[in-house]
Amino acid sequence: MSESPARDIFQLVKLEEERKFLPQLERIFSWVNKLQELSQPQEYAFYPPGLSLKLRRDVPEEFPERDKLLALAPRIKEGHFAVPRVI
Amino acid sequence: MNFSLMSIDEILRMEENGEVSPRQVWDHFSERRRRWEPEINAFITTVEDLEGNGLAVGVKDNIAVKGLPTTCGSRMLRNYESPYSATAWERLRARGFSLAGKTNLDEFAMGSSTETSFLGPTRNPWDPERTPGGSSGGSAAAVAAGMVKFALGSDTGGSVRQPASFCGVVGFKPTYGRISRFGLVAFASSLDQIGILSTSVRDAAYVFSVVGGDDPRDSTTSRRPVPDFQEIFSSPLDSFTFVYPDEEVLGRAEDEVRREFMEFVKMAEALGGRGKEVSMPLLNYAMEAYYIVANAEASSNLARYDGVRYGLRQEAEDLLQMYMKTRTAGFGDEVKRRILTGGFVLSRGYYEDYYGRAVSYRKQLSAFMEDVFSRADFLLLPTTPHVAFKIGERQDPIEMYMEDFFTVFVNLAGLPAISIPWSLLDGLPIGFQIVSRWYNEIGMLRLAEKMERSIDFKNKLILKEV
């Protein structure tokens, strides 16, 4: 595990504390490297066998308590979620 | 009357006949919560409102109940209140069950000891110095101490079965897709499954028949009908075949657990089973593959906690800093480790070597399990490598992950499994697992109930205390 891509991950997943976690990640990756003993991947399974995803009509539904959802937000402004200025 | 020792259907029958009132039933469990909760810390939120039949239920605090907090044991969601309820809880409520409270868990269900909860650890009723296991440790402890009749948990890699083994209760995880995940806070969506913790196999079957089944709000639920409770035990299981792993896999358990497990195998044979030892070398990679798959999905699922729509926010000058500070302050160390490893295995240049190999392993494992169940009805194996460990004893994350060695492969393949209490080792419970082919919950519950009747387990030691 080289340091530079590992540092990029902190930006990607939006977490700080590189100094604390980098050595721990090194150790974890040397553990999961055991998987390299297995043959090169040929077929994949992303979910358990026998599962067939169902389709349903794409009909918008109104959530009856919009105000309650908004009330969960740390900051709202004029009925919208508020964030720091981005431009 | 000790309602903790009676089955759900028995209590409901007595209520119907007017022999007991819902209030009497509710007060029994209430009294036990007053006695045990200060010592055990099984609940994050308690509710003292009797509704319906008085049978008290615990719901893990990553399962939404409208109007109540769903904290996931995390600082991130400390003040979050659910605006809707999970389907599993809605179905219980519709049948008259009463909520006793939301139970403690490892933060975002990531752990095996219920120690990483922001609200402090849950303690094992058998020995409060020890953990109840995890991540559904609050649910398992609440059931073991008789504070609730049963509890819902979630099982992504063993989080229902492992604490069930540590607390001397039944832990049931159905086939993936049997119980709706609508309202269950997502950890690893292709592995997550709501499960049931109870004091008997019969009760687990009863609850399964209520909460299971198709749900239009979860596209991964199966359309196959869930068996009716009466149907499950309508005919006995006379003869069956089973396999159990050889020393290479069993060697992961401590000597005493292995010895006890072989007694479990002998009992299965005495009850009409034809058993055979099998080699399962593939299981030796399950832990590593699970860690990659689960964390890849977790890094994606937990991206939603950004301080914008709900949960904690740490204010900052710009948006990126707000995200970084919020997530760094809101998540605990174990959750951060998992998000980081998950992000890494999905990143360009590493995807094939890590995630690719893990999902390829998953394919091989499923094919292997298909072969196993083409030759036998059941697979028996330990649930945990040892009895409950002490709080604070496992400091090394990898050592903690290995606690789930006997359970994670079940989730990777999406199989049904149940852990039933077997015996006490030095005064602490240990449970063993029965795994079956996909959707054969009926057969699995029949065998589990048959074995339970023959096992002289003293789980009632705690339940008999007032």
Image: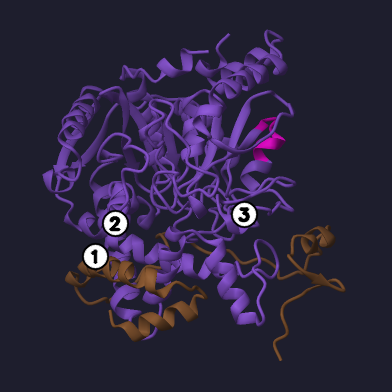
Chain colours: A brown, B purple
| Highlighted magenta segment, given as a residue range | B91-99
Tell me the quarter of the picture where residue B114 sits.
top left
Splitting the image into 4 quarters, where does residue B413 fall? bottom left
The quarter of the picture where residue B88 lies is top right
Q: Position of residue B220 (x, y in %)?
A: 54, 59
Q: Residue at x 44, y 38 (%)?
A: B172
The residue where tag 3 is placed is B182
Q: Which of the two discs, 1 and 3, sits closer to the camera?
A: 1
Q: Are marks 1 and 3 on the same chain?
A: no
> Is label 2 in a helix, a strand or a loop?
helix
Above or below, B20 relative to B232: above
Q: Are marks 2 and 3 on the same chain?
A: yes
Left or right: B319 with respect to B197? Answer: right
Q: CA distance from mark 2 to mark 1?
A: 8 Å
Q: Chain of mark 3?
A: B
On the image, the x and y values in percent for residue B146 come to 52, 23
Q: Which residue is mark 2?
A: B398
* In-front residue for pair B175/A3: A3
Q: Circle 2: is it few (<14), some (14-19), or many (20+) Cα within 10 Å?
A: some
Q: Residue at x 74, y 29 (%)?
A: B49
* Badge 1: residue crowd in 10 Å (few <14, some 14–19, many ≥20): few
Look at mark 1 in the image and give the residue it sits on: A31
Task: Please state the horizontal and vertical placement of residue B369, each as a whole percent of the image.
Answer: 28, 53
Q: Does the CB distance between marks 2 and 1 fall below 8 Å?
A: yes
Query: Is residue B349 visible in the rendered structure shown here?
Result: no
Q: CA distance from mark 1 to mark 3?
A: 34 Å
Rounded to the nearest whole Å, what is the CA distance between mark 2 and mark 3? 31 Å
Is residue A44 one of those drawn in magenta?
no
Kind of residue indicated by mark 3: Phe
Q: Amino acid at mark 1?
A: Trp
- Secondary structure at badge 1 equals helix
